[in-house]
Structures are given as C-alpha cells and as structure tokens.
Amino acid sequence: MTGHSQISLEDRVVLITGASRGIGAAIAQACADVGARVVLTSRKQPGLDEVAAQIRQTGGTALPIACHMGKPEQIDKLFADVASELGQIDVLVNNAATNPYFGPLIDTPESAIDKTIEVNLKGYLFAARAYVKHLRSRSAERGSIINMASVMGMRAAPMQGIYSMTKAAVIAMTKTLALELGTSGIRVNAIAPGLIETKFASAIVENPTLREHVVKRTPLARHGQPIEIAAAAVYLASDASSFMTGQTLAIDGGFTST
Ligand SMILES: NC(=O)c1ccc[n+]([C@@H]2O[C@H](COP(=O)([O-])OP(=O)(O)OC[C@H]3O[C@@H](n4cnc5c(N)ncnc54)[C@H](OP(=O)(O)O)[C@@H]3O)[C@@H](O)[C@H]2O)c1
C-alpha cells in the first residue's frame, strides 16, 4: 500500500534548487528534519555552505553544489554529479527563479524576457528532464516533482508580467508532466505562494504602499514566512501525498480565494 499518515522522508534524497535562502532553504531544513538527505543548489556556493552547515548542526545531511538553472549543461552535470555521489535522487523541488524586470509588460526588454524564461521555465523543464532520466536509469518506481509557481501565475500581475507568464506556464507544465509521467509513478505538483518575506519579495514587503496593496486583498491580512511553505513541500515530497498529482496548492493567506 502506498500513502502514509506519518510524514517521513527517511532514505530519500531531495534536491532543492534555489536553496541558499528564503523558501528553498526553509524547504531544505524541513525535509532534513523528517529524515531526508538534501542536495542544496543555487548559483553561489557560500550561501549554500551556510544553509548546509545549519542543517548539519541539527543532525541532518546536506550536500551543497552550485549550479546556474539557466544553463542546461550545468543542470545535466548537477544530476550526474549527485547521482554518482549519493546514488539516488528521489524528489526534485524546482524552486530557483528570477524576476529581473519591474514595469509594464509591453516595455519588457528582450534580455529580461529571455533571462526570465531561461531560469523560471526552461530551468524547471530541463531539471525535470534530467530527474526523470535519472529515475529511469535506476528503474525507480516512484518520484515526486514539486514546482514552485506563484499566485502571480493565477492572477493579473501588473509590473510583473513576464514573471507571471512563466509562473502560469509552470502550472501548465505541472499538469502535462503529471499526465505524461503518472503511469511511471512520478507525481508532479506545484505550490503557489502568496507574498512571502524573502529577499526576492523585499521590494514589496519593505514598501508600505506595495505591501498594503497585497495585504488588504488577503483574508489573513498579512504576508507569509518561508516556513509556512515548507511543510507543504514536505507533504508533496512524501508518500503522504501518494494519490495527489497535477495540482497547484495555493498558500497565500487566502489571496486567490476572493
Ligand atoms: N517570496 C515571494 O513572495 C514568492 C511568492 C510566490 C512565489 N515565489 C517563488 O518562490 C521561489 C523562491 O523564491 P524566494 O522568495 O525564496 O527567493 P529568494 O529568497 O530570493 O531565493 C531565491 C533562490 O534562488 C536562487 N537563484 C536565483 N537565480 C538562480 C539561478 N539562475 N540558478 C540557480 N539558483 C538561482 C538564489 O540563490 P543564488 O543567488 O545563489 O543563485 C536563492 O537561493 C521562486 O520560485 C519564487 O518565484 C516567491
């Protein structure tokens, strides 16, 4: 029987992109807390080493490896290196994303369009491709991909148009991958956070006018913290969610419910 009422990631390796801070770091710690060995990746090694040290201090096992998710050759190398180091990758958390442009959609410079699509969309898809290839090489009978989307992919997103387009595409990608990989035992789900206090969102959280604009549309009347996303990722990674695929879980204080 699959499924489990107690959440555990014992004997699992979870690879998390964008794990040097924010939501990715919180997910990594939460997965390690329930027994997973975690692979932490982002562009810059020092931040990854710090998160790995914190996880080790709490008794966890963490492997920090730098990788730029906009560079397909680095992604393939990452999966090859982790497979040879740890022998297995059981769960992929596609979380690293970029949002280099703030302004009207029609004025977006082509360089910002390309960068956003390369990291947020092609990066997720190429990581999923490398992960599935790895699972097939091991004849693994199950897998779980968790894609970090955003409520901005579900609503109009003034001044963040190209970013929101990639997040809507991530939700579409989640559904198609779920359908195509379901018979291989690979589940694919997404999380759509609302406004969460991280470096990524600091321009909004630290600007009273912009923050209030979001908060007044949020039933819980506040923004969230990375830890409030982490447990959902642990659930989606684990067998506790064994009958769930193709879904996008909004964790947004109710922002998309109104
Ligand atoms: N915060 C929010 O309000 C919010 C809301 C909805 C969705 N999200 C989503 O949540 C995810 C995490 O965001 P966050 O808020 O936790 O941001 P964050 O604290 O700024 O963290 C972003 C992480 O991504 C890494 N990263 C950035 N570009 C990368 C690249 N090209 N290749 C590899 N790693 C890269 C960063 O590390 P390096 O600098 O070392 O590369 C860092 O670890 C993103 O997908 C974001 O779209 C956030």
Image (tube, helix red, strand yellow):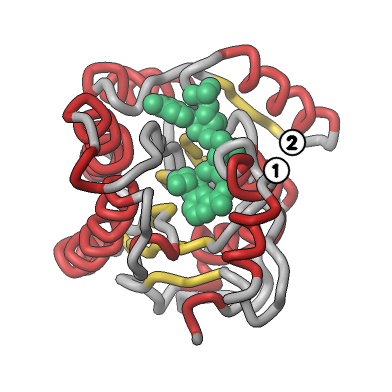
Q: What residue is shown at x 43% (from left), y 59% (from top)?
A: 150
- Residue placed furthest toward the bottom: 258
The residue carrying pointer 2 sits among few (fewer than 14), some (14 to 19) or many (20 or more) residues within 10 Å by Cα, namely many
Give the mark nearest the N terminus, 1 or 2: 1
Q: Label 1, on which residue?
A: 29
Tell me the element at label 2: loop
Front position in the image: 39 or 117: 117
Task: Examine the rendered structure and indicate whether residue 258 appears above or below residue 253.
Answer: below
The mark found on residue 58 in the picture is: none
Q: Which numbered disc, 1 or 2, marks the residue closer to the eye?
A: 1
Task: Examine the rendered structure and indicate whether residue 196 appears above or below residue 42.
Answer: below
Tell me the element at label 1: helix
The residue carrying pointer 1 sits among few (fewer than 14), some (14 to 19) or many (20 or more) residues within 10 Å by Cα, namely many
**Picture coordinates of residue 215, whole percent (x, y):** 65, 68
Q: Label 2, on which residue?
A: 60
**Picture coordinates of residue 56, whole percent (x, y):** 77, 28
Residue 150 placement, left or right of 233:
left
**Picture coordinates of residue 181, whole percent (x, y):** 20, 61
- Distance, label 1 to label 2, CA atoms, is 8 Å
Q: What residue is shown at x 33% (from left), y 66% (from top)?
A: 156
**Picture coordinates of residue 12, whole percent (x, y):** 54, 46
Residue 108 placement, left or right of 98:
left
Q: What residue is shown at x 58% (from left), y 76% (from top)?
A: 217
Disc 1 + disc 2, Cβ < 8 Å = yes
Q: What residue is shown at x 58% (from left), y 79% (from top)?
A: 254
Confirm if mark 2 falls within 8 A of ligand 1. Answer: no
Residue 56 placement, left or right of 236:
right
Amino acid found under the numbered disc labelled 2 = Gly
Confirm if mark 1 falls within 8 A of ligand 1. Answer: no
Amino acid found under the numbered disc labelled 1 = Gln
